[in-house]
Image (cartoon, rainbow, N blue to C red):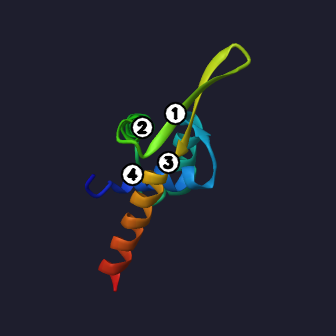
Amino acid sequence: MGEISATAAALLGQLAWREQSTYELAKGMSRNLHFFWPRAESHSYREIKRLVADGLASAHRGRTGRRPRTTYRITPAGEAALHQWLGARSRRDS
């Protein structure tokens, strides 16, 4: 797998804190990054599905009451990709 996008890195960073639903991820992106890096919520929804397809995150289906809910976790491959992305950024900045 090649280098991940900045959006993918931001989502993986949020998943490194804890398991989250797509809604929580999109809201976190909006709350934490919107002042300097605007992204449409729909972009986060698409990107998390791509991370699952690439094996960087895993999806777990469940329910909240009657409503279906999918939560996501970072995988070991996702952790490695995030660390690689962070390392590449710091080397470019030095």
Dot 1, crowdedness within 10 Å: few (<14), some or many (≥20)? Answer: many
Distance Cα–Cα, label 1 vs label 4: 18 Å
Front residue of 61 and 33: 61
Residue 52: mark: 2
Q: Earlier in the sequence, mark 3 or mark 4?
A: 4
Query: Residue 93: percent from the left, percent from the top?
Result: 34, 81
Q: In the figure, residue 67 lies in which quadrant?
A: top right
Q: Residue under circle 4?
A: 7
Q: Would you say the residues marked 2 and 1 are in contact, meaning their CB atoms lie under 8 Å apart?
A: yes
Q: Earlier in the sequence, mark 2 or mark 3?
A: 2
Dot 3, crowdedness within 10 Å: few (<14), some or many (≥20)? Answer: some
Q: Would you say the residues marked 1 and 4 are in contact, meaning their CB atoms lie under 8 Å apart?
A: no
Query: Residue 64: percent from the left, percent from the top?
Result: 70, 22
The residue depicted at 40 percent of the width and 46 percent of the height is 39
Q: Earlier in the sequence, mark 4 or mark 2?
A: 4
Distance Cα–Cα, label 2 vs label 3: 9 Å
Q: Amino acid at mark 4?
A: Thr
| Label 1 residue SS | strand
Q: Amino acid at mark 1?
A: Ala
Residue 59: mark: 1
Residue 75: mark: 3
| Residue, far top | 66
Distance Cα–Cα, label 3 vs label 1: 10 Å
Distance Cα–Cα, label 4 vs label 2: 14 Å
**Nearer the observer, disc 2 or disc 3?**
3
Q: In the figure, residue 17 lies in which quadrant?
A: bottom right
**Nearer the observer, disc 3 or disc 4?**
3
